[in-house]
Amino acid sequence: MGSREEVDARLAMEEVTPLQEEEKEYKEAIIEALTPEQAEKMTELDFITIIRGYQTYNPRKEETVKAAKMIADWRDKVDYYHFLDQRLEKDEMFHKLWPESIYGEDKYGHPIVYMRVSEIDTDKLAEMNEEHMLRLQGQKQTAYLKYKEDISKRRGEQRYKYILIVDLKGTGMGILGGKKRGMLQKIFAVGADNFPESIWKIFVINTPFLFRTVWAMIKPWIHPITQAKINIHGGVSDAVKKMKEAGISATAIPELMGGSCKPVNTFEYMIGVIKANQEAAAEGGADADAAADDDEGDGDDAQEESADKAADDMGHLAVV
């Protein structure tokens, strides 16, 4: 087994492993830094992804706690915990300007997300309110969390990472400069800053020659774990070969890359989740109302029984 395969196997095993004893001190430090309300809302998976996402940072505890506090504050600011309870203004427009699709899963259960950079309309995105646009990106990332949660339940083991395919077909090197670069950086930063430890692998396909040249120059400076995540390919066939070597079968690879997997539109999936949550909430409310009515009826019966008993008692007193 080569070094990349060894790294993959180790990280895949780590992903299904609960928080370890040596990691618990970081959880305690995070809880101490958050408000009681923020700490209560944090799930065990939140602690796992934050703690492991910052395990290579120094000083580790300080950087981990700082990141956790930043994430908790961001969640409060954007109303994160209601992202999948209701639609946000201009959500459909945002997804049309930055379309993404979900495909199959690798052998471990990591879902594949595909995006083509040339389809991103950075000019029209720039016309949107920036704060709200980044909130919409956060909502989309939250939908991916739900998708991975469903996979974990189906497979019976925890998976919190996904595979990203970035297609540069029709995209020139101009995307790396000026306003377009700044726009992409801000949107990608939403995921990097607030959803740590989310990426399993990135396959960049149809890359221009100059792009690959730059990558070859900087690759030796990048951490081996990060290197194992990023795959740069000039053509689709080479990318597909590497994907198969990484445990992604043809049935999981997008049709547009020669595989047989049909896309699930990210926006349509997210709307389906929101609708299901709203229906569940409505049913829960109806059940609660019905229970309250039953309790009220039981209360009336109890009052009648109490009144009857009081009358009997008064009768006994009158006789005495």
Image (spheres, rainbow, N blue to C red):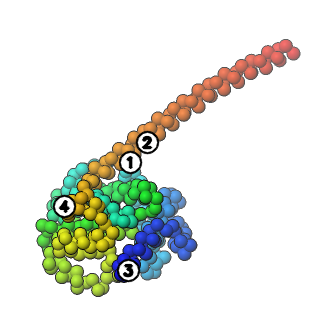
Dot 4 surroundings within 10 Å: few (below 14), some, or many (20 or more)? few
The relative height of residue 296 versus residue 227 in the rendered view (above or below) is: above
Quadrant assignment, res 96: bottom left
Check disc 3 and report the residue beneath it: 1
Q: Determine the residue located farthest toward the right in the rendered image.
A: 320
Q: How far apart are the two marked residues, 2 and 4, measured between alpha carbons?
A: 38 Å
Q: Report helix, strand or loop for mark 1.
A: loop
Q: Label 4 near label 2: C-beta < 8 Å?
A: no
Q: Residue at x 15, y 67 (%)?
A: 169
Of badges 2 and 3, the one in the foreground is 3
Type of amino acid under label 1: Asp
Mark 1–mark 4 distance (CA, rounded to whole Å): 33 Å
Q: Are marks 1 and 2 in contact (CB under 8 Å)?
A: yes
Amino acid type, residue under disc 3 in the picture: Met
Give the answer, above or below, for where 230 lies relative to 164.
Answer: below
Which residue position is annotated with label 4? 256
